[in-house]
Amino acid sequence: MNRLNWDDHMKFEVDWWRKFPNSNIVVSVHADFFQYIYSHYCISIHSHHFNRALEIGLGASGGYLGIIQSIGERYGLDPLVDELKDLLPYKKQIKYYQGTAEELPFADGFFDLVIISNAIDHCIDPQKVANEMKRVLSKNGVVLIFNYLNEDKNHPHSYSHYNQVRELFKLRVVEEHYFAARNRFRQRNPYYVGIYKK
């Protein structure tokens, strides 16, 4: 299957987000799914308080930074921040950064939680992204990863099994879940939730 190159993929993503007329609708479309997944499948971190959290590739949804309550400072990074700036929600709560995850503009060990939701397969170099996420993660910090498997050609990368996602990080697995293609909120690809610790 031929996959989109990076520039074509970014254009596809902008067009996809732009089908929503405003940020309230973007959030409402995604929030129920995020809340359901976090409530039922991230139990091992429910009692944690995180001083600083970064979410990579949150698009215009606000991602899990808009769902998880026990976070002090919230940072979001996406290559489309400039293109989607009028759609970005939670602007008072989230510090948004334009950029790619292969070169995170943060110091070593800066975050105690790093999230990547449905984005590792959108990146140019997923292994470099995983390495950068580990670099900015503090000692005993948590990586929270969500990803669809068997993605279509509109994604630069695809993973057929969650072991391939886990192998990128090589961190201790705290909790993980795998969902079949059909579930309560999404009638599409299989879905993986992984919680890793440094």
Image (cartoon, helix red, strand yellow):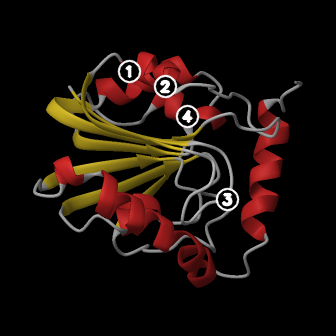
The percent position of residue 69, horizontal first and vertical second, equals 23, 68
* Residue with the mark numbered 1: 169
Looking at the image, residue 62 lies above or below residue 133: below
Q: Are marks 1 and 2 in contact (CB under 8 Å)?
A: yes
Gap between marks 1 and 2 measured at Cα: 7 Å
- Closest to the camera, between mark 2 and mark 4, is 2
The percent position of residue 151, horizontal first and vertical second, equals 71, 37
The structure residue drawn at horizontal position 69% and vertical position 27%, both measured from the top left corner, is: 157
On the rendered structure, is 62 left or right of 21? left
The structure residue drawn at horizontal position 79% and vertical position 41%, both measured from the top left corner, is: 9
Amino acid carrying label 1: it is Phe
* Residue with the mark numbered 2: 165
How crowded pointer 2 is (Cα within 10 Å; few <14, some 14-19, many 20+) is rated as many
Q: Are marks 3 and 1 in contact (CB under 8 Å)?
A: no
Gap between marks 2 and 3 measured at Cα: 21 Å
Q: Secondary structure at mark 4?
A: helix
* Residue with the mark numbered 4: 120
Quarter holding the C terminus is: top left
Q: Nearer the viewer, residue 143 or 8?
A: 143
Closer to the N terminus: mark 2 or mark 4? 4
* Residue with the mark numbered 3: 187
**Which residue is farthest right?**
2
